[in-house]
Image: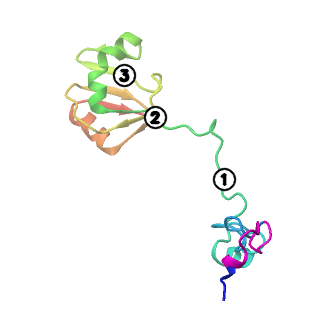
Amino acid sequence: MPSRTKKMRGSRTHGRGKKAGRGAGLIGGHGQAGLGKTGKIYMLRYDRDHFGRHGFKRPQCTVRANATINVSELEESVEKFISMGFAVKEGDMYNINLTNAGIDKLLGNGNIDIPVKVTVSQVSAKAREKIEASGGSIAE
């Protein structure tokens, strides 16, 4: 008995019609094709959030990261702050206004050896500890 393939030699579609003989036509597509139609039950059971938009994305104009500086960077940048007008030297202590310099928070990484009086809106506990240990103070 001849095989079906042998019988269909010369036939353009081998008896499958036009679409079914190409790619994954007979099985309804590859992957997640047809989740809105033939695969609807599968989608509802295993992937309910497949369609649509989910969540909320804040507008980028309202999202702003804090500008921060470490105490080690503060010690290195004292002269720069003086030249820019954000710091003044009063005796042996430096008075630095980080709020006017556009810095929101002082962090405690590194060491500081000079006494400084810092004005800043937020300060970490470690930074406060190190500033006060060096003989300085923090005004918020």
Cα separation between marks 2 and 3:
13 Å
Mark sitting on residue 56: 1
The range drawn in magenta is: 5-18
Q: Nearer the viewer, mark 1 or mark 2?
A: 1
Asked if 81 appears above or below 60 in the picture, the reply is above
Q: Nearer the viewer, residue 121 or 72?
A: 72
Apparent side of residue 36 relative to residue 95 in the rendered image (left or right): right
> Can residue 88 be seen from the camera position used here?
no
In which quadrant is the N terminus drawn? bottom right
- In terms of image quadrants, where is residue 43? bottom right
Can you identify the residue that label 2 sits on? 121
Callout 2: 10 Å neighbours few (<14), some, many (20+)? Answer: some
Cα separation between marks 3 and 1:
40 Å
Apparent side of residue 23 relative to residue 109 in the rendered image (left or right): right
Q: Nearer the viewer, mark 3 or mark 1?
A: 1
- Residue 9 on the magenta span: yes
Q: Are marks 2 and 3 in contact (CB under 8 Å)?
A: no
Q: Amino acid at mark 2?
A: Ser
Q: Amino acid at mark 3?
A: Ile
Q: Nearer the viewer, residue 15 or 30?
A: 15
State how the image is colored. Answer: rainbow
Q: Nearer the viewer, residue 42 or 4?
A: 4
Can you identify the residue that label 3 sits on? 96
Callout 3: 10 Å neighbours few (<14), some, many (20+)? Answer: many
